[in-house]
Image (cartoon, rainbow, N blue to C red):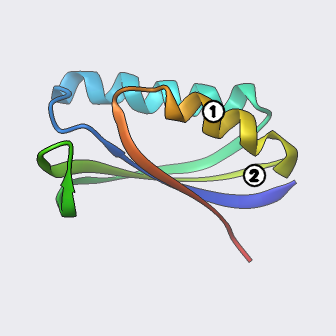
Amino acid sequence: MRKYEIMYIINPTVLEEARESVIAKVNEILTEAGAVVAKTEKWGERKLAYPIDKKKTGFYVLTTLEMDGTKLVEVERKLNITEAVMRYILVKQD
């Protein structure tokens, strides 16, 4: 099991109440792939470096986890079809 961080941006059109369900859905995707979620930090709504789908802000979330690297393809496939997640990056920690 290796340590990873995933930073993802939730679409700003998602209402504040629904953000919790998006975060729960992403954590569910991770746990279904065998990940152990250590912590989830909500960074809040921030300005994007460049517009994505004509949107200039997004709600940032950082999650630290441990998982087997062979399951990353499955996690990325599911995140790509999650409409509320505009962008994500998954990096391995040293």
Q: Which mark is residue 11?
A: none
Q: What residue appears at the point 76 percent right and 31 percent down from the top-left corner?
A: 33
User: Which circle's residue, 1 or 2, is located before the other in the chain?
Assistant: 2
Which residue ends up furthest to the front in the rendered image? 53
Which image quadrant: the C terminus?
Answer: bottom right
Q: Would residue 59 be found to the left or right of residue 37 on screen?
A: left
**Image coordinates for residue 32, horizontal then vertical, percent:** 72, 25
Which residue ends up furthest to the bottom in the rendered image? 94
Question: Where on the picture, by quarter, is residue 21?
Answer: top left
The residue carrying pointer 2 sits among few (fewer than 14), some (14 to 19) or many (20 or more) residues within 10 Å by Cα, namely some
Q: Which mark is residue 66?
A: 2
**Image coordinates for residue 48, horizontal then vertical, percent:** 20, 61
Give the Cα separation between the discs numbered 1 and 2: 18 Å
**Badge 2 amino acid:** Glu
Q: Which mark is residue 77?
A: 1
Q: What residue appears at the point 37 percent right and 26 percent down from the top-left corner?
A: 83
Q: What residue appears at the point 66 percent right and 36 percent down from the top-left corner?
A: 75
